[in-house]
Amino acid sequence: MNQFKRILFLALVFMGIGSISVSAQSVRSLLRKAKQQYDVRAYTKAIETYQQVLDRRKDNTEALSYLGDCYRHLNQMEEAADKYAQAMQDLKGIEDKHILNFGKTLKALERYSQAEQVFKVYANRNPTLGNHYAASCEFARNQEGMQTDYAVSNERINSTASDFGAAFYLEDVVFASGRTDVQRSTYNWDGQAKNQLFVSRLGLDGFLQPPRYLKGAASNRGEGPASFSPEGNIIAFTNNDFISGIRQIPSDGNELVLYLAELGTTGTWFNEKPFPQNDPNSKTGYPAFTPDGSAMFFASDRAGGYGGYDLYISYLDNNVWSIPINLGPVVNTAGDEISPFFDGTDLYFASDYHYGFGGFDNFKAEQRNGQWSVVTNLGVPSNSSRDDYGFIYDNFKNIGYLTSNRPGGRGAEDIYKVSKATNNNVVLRIINGADGNPISFANIDFGACGQAIAGGSAQAVSDARGVYSFPVPFEINCEIIISSPGFTPRTYPLSTAALIGGGDLEIVMSREGETYSGKVERYQTRQPLEGISVTARNLNTGSSTQVFSDRTGTFNIGLEGNTPYMLIYSSAGYREIRRNVNTATLGADGLGTMSLSLTSELPPYNNDIDNDPFPPNPPDGNNNPVLQSGFSVQLGALGKRPDVNRYSNLNSLNAGDVYIKEEGNVFKVRYGVFPNRADAQRLVSSVRGKGYRDAYVVPENGVSIGGATNPVTNRPPVTNPPVNRPPVTNPPVNTTGSYKIQLAALRNTRFFDPSKITSLGTIQDYRRGDLIIKVLGNFGSVQAAQSALLQVKQNGFPTAFIVVDQNGTLQRL
């Protein structure tokens, strides 16, 4: 019996060992697969595979580290920091590079004190780099709140993809973009659009106008950034493999090759050839001609430099490009330097090593006695804690551009307009919202502001360009009134805090009778959304105007009468919605209410749960269906009657019927009918997902459609399933807890409105310099604070975060 027990015990042991071996083998196989995906920059897929590893080994250091790195490359810094922090529990097992990247991630999140501590841990392994980056955190902390003379604003031409690398081209601006809302887009291996070069003209309103292809059509490769000779007849451009959504940083392993080509007057290219000083064993890109065209700066990671990417210059002598010269250790560092721009006096460039705020920062290098001698960080807002690069600037026109993936942008990378306030002046630009044109000689009433501005007078007039400039007053908190014959008067608030540093303020006005109102709400909660961009593109002229929703979700926009427009609703984190309208058919409700869903949530397919189900179409006297009045989604317009059964794949949406409406000799295929525009608009994205890419919303006027055009299905009316929303429970107010939620940091609290969140806790004030920090407290645990934070963000404070009171000082958690 004892012998039998021993045999049984050994068998069980061996079975256990075998099980462990299979499991371990599975983890190793998954790690190999994930690393292969990581190496080819398929970061989203790698995240899924590394997560499978963690499902089996939740504390696997390699999976946690590389998960953090995947999120870092995707610019999802909060997620990256969380995974790195877990990996740091195994200090012996974590690789050096992941500790360094953890510190850089914390710096990108503006957690400078925490980042400094991580860099000091890294200094135990690499003292030079670790101590350097630790000192850079101190620099960033000391510069917080200090503004420079530059003003920065997001450009209107940005898309939800990557838009980057602006360059001056004669009177135009050329930039690269991965947008897909143009014809003949080309794609790389994983379906992402390749970056193309676009050209745009600066409008009278100071913003770039809708762009077109520089070459007239898409290329079969990724192109950009570029630079142009002074005469505009030579282009130097970078052949790249950038992917929208992935940071454009050297550690991503991007392939860059520099090319030259001649440009014709009609946009044609010819005599294209590689830059003679490309190095076959390295990467070369980011060209920048000197103003006289006699030389070109560029970035390259070729051997013999000071770090990763260094900046070089090559001279053009008798049509021969000289051997490149490294700009030396004042400019180049142990890190990466990219995107040079030389204005004839100073060199602007980006670096991830010179002391900065996080990621890449923009810098200026000055020459003394023919040598680069002084390098200066351009400061905030030209820089942020994320990647900021590609700075260019025209001193004569007082306008420039930079590229950034900072929070609050529209896409992966955005182009930002840069201007410099002359003598610390504020510039009012008054434009017609319907077409973007300036309103000449508009009246500006400063009567409520006292005698501090407008030359001591209460009245002022804009110039022929719709511009009026005045110095920033010492103290002001009032409203001005702008008026012009034929336009609805506009009231605009001014405050010293908002005007510090000067810059442009665009004031959009509408002609009387041409102002249309609308609202934006979150689909899942029906709560109003503040700060949603609403862009109206005039389909006749191509001009655009942009406004933003206020705290009630309301916006007012000027549109010309009897004119077709495309309206684009967009904001970071939300699914973009596009709709076509014609002001000739807009009713009394104006633009109505549009519901937006978070990108992390499924698109809404059902009708509004607050409405009764839309009834089926009743027959007319001939038993032909009669359409209800409302709105439908138009799928297409054909010259002959199609078979409606071709559209049966829409049945799975379970929201409407396909029908055909004959108008003249045109057969319009539609899906509907829905009681209001918002219901129809919610279906557009899902209809397009079924293959009808040009679908858009149209009004339906309720006429008979005839027996030959019966809908595909005769389903009963759609009833909406109940929505299982979790009940909102407000955490109890705890006056002794140390956890709080920081809502805002303000110089002026006049417009601070906490009314929607006061039931969650007590509003408290902290002071930091001249700022008033508004916080919601107090919470006795992190869990209670996190529960309240979700509701706080939904109720109008999307940038709120949790802090801890440590001896009267707030520390971000």
Image (cartoon, rainbow, N blue to C red):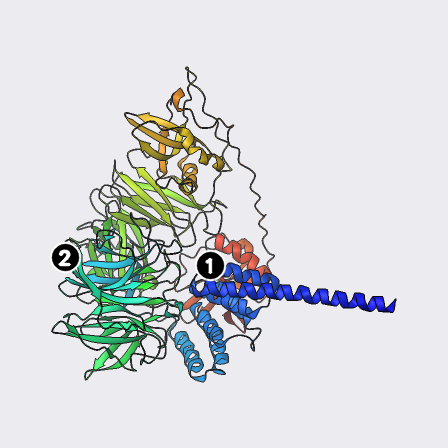
Q: Is residue 260 visible?
A: no
Tell me the amino acid under the disc marked 2: Gly
Quarter of the view holding residue 328: bottom left
Nearer to us in this view, 796 or 20: 20
Residue 298's disc is none
The residue shown at (23%, 50%) is 431
Quarter of the view holding residue 751: bottom left
Residue 264's disc is 2
Residue 2 located left or right of residue 141? right
Tell me the amino acid under the disc marked 1: Thr
How many marks the image carries: the answer is: 2
Q: What is the x, y in percent for residue 609?
A: 51, 38
The residue shown at (22%, 44%) is 541
Q: Against 20, is 540 above or below?
A: above
Mark 1 sits on what residue?
A: 44
Nearer to us in this view, 211 or 16: 16
Q: What is the x, y in percent for residue 565?
A: 29, 41
How packed mark 2 is, by other alpha carbons closer than 10 Å (few <14, some 14-19, many 20 or more), is few
Answer with mark 1 or mark 2, whichever residue precedes in sequence. Answer: 1
